[in-house]
């Protein structure tokens, strides 16, 4: 499997745009996937600069219903005429971030559900897309390794309530007798997401884990939303789950990455915009 980060908060190449968000191009088992589309058309523009043909993407998966992963979808869908977009129905919810001036909408732009309705595929259970590509939608959290995210909420008939991230999913890619895990932001907790995959596929070793871990104070790369002790404990826990490589990015943040790196060493890589890895 080969993963290329089309857009992320940082970039390895000066010619590429960087924005707070995430979009990754995945080549696996003869398939071409887009995992998240970033916050704008910049993801598609970066793909052109990297020589990646988005018109050949056969499947797009949205990790969760936040605009910094979804607002690039219209630009992608205008370039690409064959791909469907797989997402959870809860992604249609009104996700908000609590700011000093009040709640601010951070969900998927509603017009997407109207303008591209025929391209959207809502998944409510485990979904096998063929060629070893499987989406998991039921995530079991590990409370010992899940950070409070009280500033992220969803609007309901009763008002604003803490977001339980029911709009989040896990992408798994199966090859060589093992499984790769891609998570987007890991709002449900990266440990719980890995353990969910290990429980579902007990006979398949984890080959790699890729995703943000939501440990930064958005949009500050140099501030953590957790204590140094939590970051260290998380690093130790990830180390105990196996010796697979971990590629992080986006909402992990540089400071949290540095703490995790102390525990995980060469197993941990920051996957900046424009970087590719083969695993």
Image (tube, grey):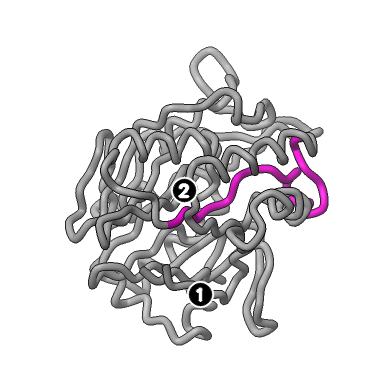
Relative image position of residue 247 (x, y in whole percent): 55, 59
Q: Which of marks 1 and 2 is nearer the N terminus?
A: 2
Relative image position of residue 110 (x, y in whole percent): 45, 44
Identified at 23% across, 72% down, the residue is 30
Instruction: Report if residue 268 lies within the magenta region.
Output: no
- Asked whether 50 or 239 is in front, the reply is 239
Identified at 66% across, 37% down, the residue is 104
Residues tagged 1 and 2 counted as in contact (Cβ below 8 A): no
Q: How far apart are marks 1 and 2 (CA)?
A: 17 Å
Q: Residue 12 is drawn in which quadrant?
A: bottom right
Mark 1 — residue? 276
Report whether 265 appears left or right of 64: right
**Is disc 2 placed on a helix, strand or loop?**
loop
Identified at 66% across, 73% down, the residue is 11
Mark 2 — residue? 183
Q: What stretch is highlighted in magenta?
A: 208-226
Other residues around mark 2 within 10 Å, as few (<14) / some (14–19) / many (≥20): many
């Amino acid at each position: 499997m080969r993963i290329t980060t089309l857009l992320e908060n940082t970039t390895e190449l000066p010619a590429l745009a960087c924005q707070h968000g995430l979009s990754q191009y995945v080549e696996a088992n003869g398939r071409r996937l887009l995992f998240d589309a970033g916050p704008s058309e910049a993801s598609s523009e970066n793909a052109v600069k990297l020589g990646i043909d988005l018109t050949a993407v056969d499947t797009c998966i949205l990790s969760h219903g936040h605009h910094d992963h979804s607002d690039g979808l219209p630009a992608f869908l205008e370039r690409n005429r064959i791909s469907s977009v797989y997402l959870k129905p809860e992604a249609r919810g009104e996700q908000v971030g609590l700011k000093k001036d009040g709640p601010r909408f951070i969900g998927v732009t509603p017009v997407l559900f109207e303008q591209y309705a025929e391209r959207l595929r809502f998944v409510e259970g485990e979904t096998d897309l063929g060629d070893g590509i499987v989406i998991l939608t039921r995530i079991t959290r590990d409370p010992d390794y899940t950070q409070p995210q009280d500033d992220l909420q969803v609007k309901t008939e009763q008002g604003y309530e803490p977001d339980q991230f029911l709009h989040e999913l896990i992408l798994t890619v199966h090859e060589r007798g093992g499984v790769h895990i891609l998570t987007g932001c890991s709002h449900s907790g990266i440990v719980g997401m890995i353990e969910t995959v290990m429980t579902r596929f007990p006979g398949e070793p984890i080959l790699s884990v890729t995703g943000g871990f939501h440990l930064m104070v958005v949009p500050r790369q140099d501030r953590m939303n957790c204590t140094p002790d939590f970051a260290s404990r998380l690093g130790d826990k990830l180390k105990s789950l196996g010796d697979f490589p971990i590629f992080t990015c986006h909402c992990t943040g540089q400071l949290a990455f540095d703490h995790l790196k102390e525990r995980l060493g060469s197993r941990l890589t920051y996957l900046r915009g424009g970087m590719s890895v083969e695993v």
